[in-house]
Image: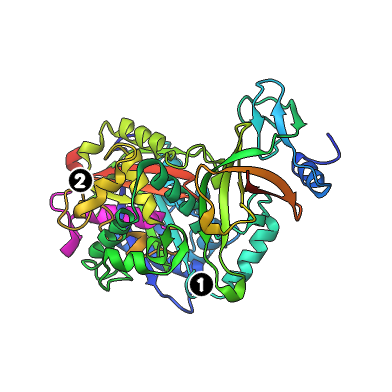
Amino acid sequence: MRGRVAIAGVGLAGCGEAPGWSETEIAAAAAKKALADAGITARDVDGLVIASTNIFMSGLALAEHMGIRPKFTESTMVGGSSFVGHLIPAALALDAGLCDVVLVAYGSNQRTGVGRAEAGKYKMALDPQVFEHPYKPFNPPTSYALAAARHMHQYGTKREQLAEIAVAARKWAQLNPEAFAREPLSVEDVLKSRMVCDPLTVRDCCLVTDGGGAYVLTRADRAKAAPQKPAYLLGVGAAHWHRQISSMPDLTVTAATESGKRAYDMARLGPQDVDVLELYDAFTINTLLFLEDLGFCKKGEGGAFVSGGRIAPGGELPVNTNGGGLSCVHPGMYGIFLLVEAVRQLRGEGGARQVKGAQVALAHGNGGVLSSQITALLGTQETL
Amino acid sequence: MPPSGPEKQYLDKLAAGRFEIQRCAACAKHVFYPRVICPHCGSDQLAWVAPSGRGTVYSTTIVRRRPADGGDYNVCLVDLEEGVRLLSRVAGIAPEQVRIGMAVRARVAHNLVEFTPA
């Protein structure tokens, strides 16, 4: 599959706060921008992909809204990683000739939308998870806190090291005019913030924003003729081993160990070849675990690895250059924003946060509670 | 098929004050939560057994909650000596006192399995 399809357009809409906007409307607004970026209109779309936590039959809803009559519709829902995972069926459909232009879109009004608490109650009633919910985990933070606590116990990882991850994300966000949280943040600020679930404070946790994103995927030949420099899909791999945190075999090792290897193998690349990383940082512990599991440092050494600003602007390894879910945007499912930022970096559109000469970008999606892991490697024309 | 699935069977046992887990007759591994097929080998030969109740805290957190809403509480993962893991809580001590590696013992209270220091 290496190099057979490419992202030809990306777009964002409603990031931060979008009061008065429905989820489908935000997705459509982001889609409009991605289509314009690719130099096409909704009329050209014959494959549609969307996932939603709230909209029933979201593929039908968005197609109806935009006047698209797709030949191919996909709505796999594995949490926030979904939109990275959507690369797989979308690429297969394009490669098989089932369709020519796939639009992948997402929209959420999680921050300002009404009825969130109410929706939570209904979800709980329909899907009671009787082996966890009675103990009142405050999820997702509780599950990630359990992973962080175990990593600290097993490897001596320190809260200060987790805090460095939040600080690095904030420093990147300060270079990104579109980021939601840009005020200064220190390690001490993170440690002194309100504790949510020990050892994670509110600054170890991602933002809760509105927002939507979209990308257009086409076969490589078509992408080449599009107005923007294509970001080619070099490799993609998926893995999941559990849904609930109590079923995760080892809380210090994620299925990214497998998804990453699958993506690297397909791309015929390794961690040493990656110029810029976009890792799904719903919590600070995520970034640390994924750096380990994707081979950027050894298991257990993530805390030391992120110290001293290594992943911050000016550090050796650029991670989460838009500011991540911790400081840029996080409307419930962050996966699509990983790809949008990866594409922008490969095109050289990063402005003050641009990683010079970025040729290979890694986007790693996480879904559930460290559950679904999906890794994608994108590259410029030069990497083919 | 039996009149109810393994989840309801488990909950019915709990309501009667009994904590039981499954053991696979085919691969001899214990299974929790209760399932229709063994996640280790795929067999459907799962039988109920009473665990010893002895376990170890694998990880722990304190969920912070305003005093007006009931205050902080513990949520933890416990590994039973049979080799299965549960989400649960350690009762009877302050949440700050729950430690990874702590030996705990299961009990049934309020139709739930919870643990106390061993």
Across and down, in percent, residue A330 comes to 41, 63
Q: Name the residue under label 1.
A: A22
Query: Mark 1 and mark 2, same subunit?
Result: yes
Is A280 positioned to the left or the right of B94 in the image? left
Across and down, in percent, residue B30 comes to 66, 30
Is A358 positioned to the left or the right of A9 in the image? left
Q: Name the residue under label 2.
A: A275
Across and down, in percent, residue A20 comes to 49, 79
In the image, residue A353 lies in the stretch drawn in magenta: yes
- Image quadrant occupied by the N terminus of chain A: top left
Q: Which of A10 and B101 is in front in this view?
A: B101
Residue A194 visible, this orientation? yes
Q: How far apart are marks 1 and 2 (CA)?
A: 36 Å
In the image, residue A297 lies in the stretch drawn in magenta: no
The disc at residue A224 is none
The amino acid at mark 2 is: Asp
Mark 1 is surrounded, within 10 Å at the Cα level, by few (under 14), some (14 to 19) or many (20 or more) other residues, namely some
Across and down, in percent, residue B47 comes to 76, 29
Answer above or below: position of A53 versus B56.
Answer: below
Q: What stretch is highlighted in magenta?
A: A334-359
The amino acid at mark 1 is: Ser
Q: How many labels does the image show?
A: 2
Q: Residue at x 63, y 43 (%)?
A: B118
